Image (spheres, grey):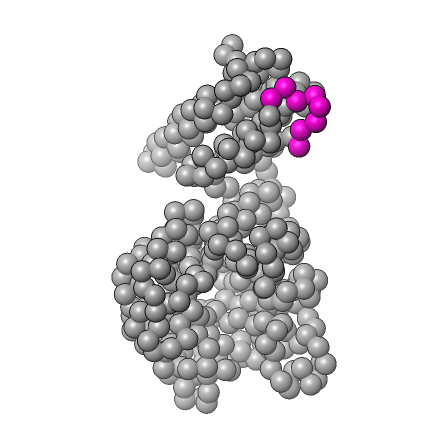
Amino acid sequence: MYNESPIIRRPSTRIYVGNVPIGDGAPIAVQSMTNTKTTDVEATVAQIKALEKVGADIVRVSVPTMDAAEAFKIIKQSVDVPLVADIHFDYRIALKVAEYGVDCLRINPGNIGNEERIRNVVECARDKNIPIRIGVNGGSLEKDLMDKYREPTPEALLESAMRHVDILDRLNFDQFKVSVKASDVFLAVASYRLLAKQIRQPLHLGITEAGGMRSGSVKSAVGLGMLLAEGIGDTIRISLAADPVEEIKVGFDILKSLRIRSRGINFIACPSCSRQEFDVINTVNELERRLEDVTTAMDVSIIGCVVNGPGEALVSHIGLTGGHAKSGYYDDGVRQKERFDNNSIVDGLEAKIRAKAAMMANRIEIADKTE
């Protein structure tokens, strides 16, 4: 199987969000953000655990009030995944969630008041070993920058980011990452390219306010794909007007397509045509639904006929090639004597995939123990 990625990552420094490494060649972390009311502790914890289940490395939680900060304390005690507190303007909230064990602060230093307040937050972060994320957004640029540039431009986003970076530099604090998000793909991409040349800190990628499930996924895949293919980016968040769980799935799909990071099954499936010998579309959709819990990285090809089926099966961990009445089954590129009845493919193939995933996971575990 051709699994080599040609991507050379941009050199960057290393920070840790909880126990998750960001930058300096660490696996690109996939994160999301809760959309529940933070003061609704039960709903927020449930959503975070759902995100953990599908592989979220980090989860961000908005903390707009002191009441939300008190809720955050309980939430933090109830989950295992590292949490980022999203805070604007009120430095006291940052100090409070730091006391409650937050793993990262999303706060723009220039927006929280005078130098003394900024210093208080930075010194608290330094003392408790908490990194900061500077988050610049094309929709909320400073008024003077909008007056200067007339509209959000890559140069405007860069200037805004560097203002906040300069504050942390003056305070001798280097444990931070930066994002320069925009809802326009080209604006975001150009801004990140400029920023990547200016600093060595890790970059948090995102196309902000990307849209609904379909359009937002496409915009994010295009924008983040362009940057990631150039080696830019150390952690990603897909911003969708959808269930946050879908953000994690799309994020991993983007990384998987670029051979940057694999988690779960990579389904290779034909769009189907009149040559298909079984219902490819429903078969793939049902298998994706049933096998969401499988985290082992593996390739499964499901092709409806013998034109492309054998070729794809040869380079897949498991392959299915459509045939009349019964379809051929491949394991690690080797055709097996066993064939699947075209009317009952899903159950049989699910069992084969689960068994193969378990065997592969066991091999990985043994290899890790012997290293």
Asked if residue 274 is among those painted magenta in the image, a careful observer would answer yes
Residue 254 in percent (x, y) is at 58, 47
Relative height, residue 342 to residue 131 (above, below): above
What predominant SS class does the magenta segment belong to? Answer: loop
Q: Residue at x 71, y 80 (%)?
A: 149
Q: Residue at x 61, y 60 (%)?
A: 210
Q: Nearer the viewer, residue 40 or 62?
A: 40
Residue 312, quarter of the rendered image = top right
Query: Which residue, as the protein is rendered here, is positioned at the far front?
Result: 343
Q: Residue at x 62, y 15 (%)?
A: 323
Residue 2 in percent (x, y) is at 60, 32
Q: Which residues are magenta?
A: 271-278
Query: Which residue, as the protein is rendered here, is positioned at the far top?
Result: 337
Q: Nearer the viewer, residue 231 or 287?
A: 287
Residue 339 in percent (x, y) is at 52, 13
Image quadrant where one finds the C terminus: top left
Residue 368, quarter of the rendered image = top left
Can I make out residue 97 in this image? no
Relative height, residue 79 to residue 269 (above, below): below
Left or right of 217, for residue 113:
left
Can I make out residue 317 in this image? yes
Q: Nearer the viewer, residue 78 or 290?
A: 290
Image quadrant where one finds the N terminus: top right
Residue 269, quarter of the rendered image = top right
Left or right of 18, for residue 177:
right
Q: Residue at x 67, y 29 (%)?
A: 272
Asked if residue 320 is among those painted magenta in the image, a careful observer would answer no
Residue 325 in percent (x, y) is at 59, 13
Relative height, residue 21 to residue 368 (above, below): below
